[in-house]
Amino acid sequence: QSVLTQPPSVSGAPGQRVTISCTGSSSNIGARYDVHWYQQFPGTAPKLLMYANSDRPSGVPDRFSGSQSGTSASLAISGLQAEDEADYYCQSYDRSLSAYVFGTGTKVIVL
Amino acid sequence: EVQLVESGGGLVQPGGSLRLSCAASGFTYWMNWVRQAPGKGLEWVASIKHDGSEKYYVDSVKGRFTISRDNANNSLYLQMSSLRAEDTAVYYCARRKEWFGEFDPWGQGTLVTVSS
């Protein structure tokens, strides 16, 4: 029962821009706790993709960008590439649950 | 570069116990366990402060799981008891530098299957 809601899937053609939403509440994203994003390929461990809402770790292409507003956050992928096909998860902290919470996950499909 | 390697997973009967280990190079900061049930999303399980003085758990494992660490041997542990079918998952260890910080890096994971 994730408290951060993401669309199950988003799709786009190579070169297009897609956006993944992460909807929370006043107990997590709305409380201004940082949102982080992870990329996971089948059968492998998650990998940090974005931290502190909009910062990219070294090595992550600038095609990936993050933002946060109110009780939601978003991850955008511009110039979509076949290698971007993976599952993406947002993550934050929830003060009501006193727990680190993850989003429901979104599968990015490259058409 | 920090590397995390989990071990100890396997098949266990409901009600049984299992201890997971995570070997880490560069063993500082908060350490965490995160799990992923087959075909499902990620769930934070437990965290322990660098000196072991603070421990936190998700409600569903409180009283059943215990997180610990041995800094001298760069090792993190998760003692799991009274295991249930719903505990079946891949368990990852991950580092977190700050209280509200990101989980990075992650280990490769170890599969725990609770079944009779």
Image: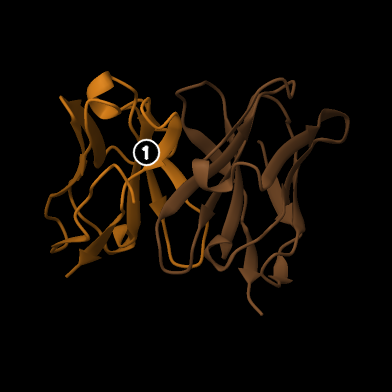
Q: Which residue is mark 1?
A: A91
Parent chain of label 1: A
Quadrant of the image containing the C terminus of chain B: bottom right
- In the displayed structure, A42 sits above or below B108; it is below
Q: Nearer the viewer, residue A52 or A82?
A: A52
**Residue B33 rendering spot, x and y as whole percentages:** 60, 44
**Residue B64 rendering spot, x and y as whole percentages:** 66, 48
Asked whether, in this view, residue B84 is left or right of residue A5, the answer is right
Quadrant location of residue B9? bottom right
Q: Nearer the viewer, residue A99 or A75?
A: A99
Which residue is at 34% across, 25% downward?
A: A34
| Chain letter, colour brown in render | B
Give the residue at the far bottom of this rendering.
B116
Q: Is residue B89 visible?
A: no
- What's the residue type where badge 1 is placed? Gln
- In the displayed structure, B38 sits above or below A7; it is below
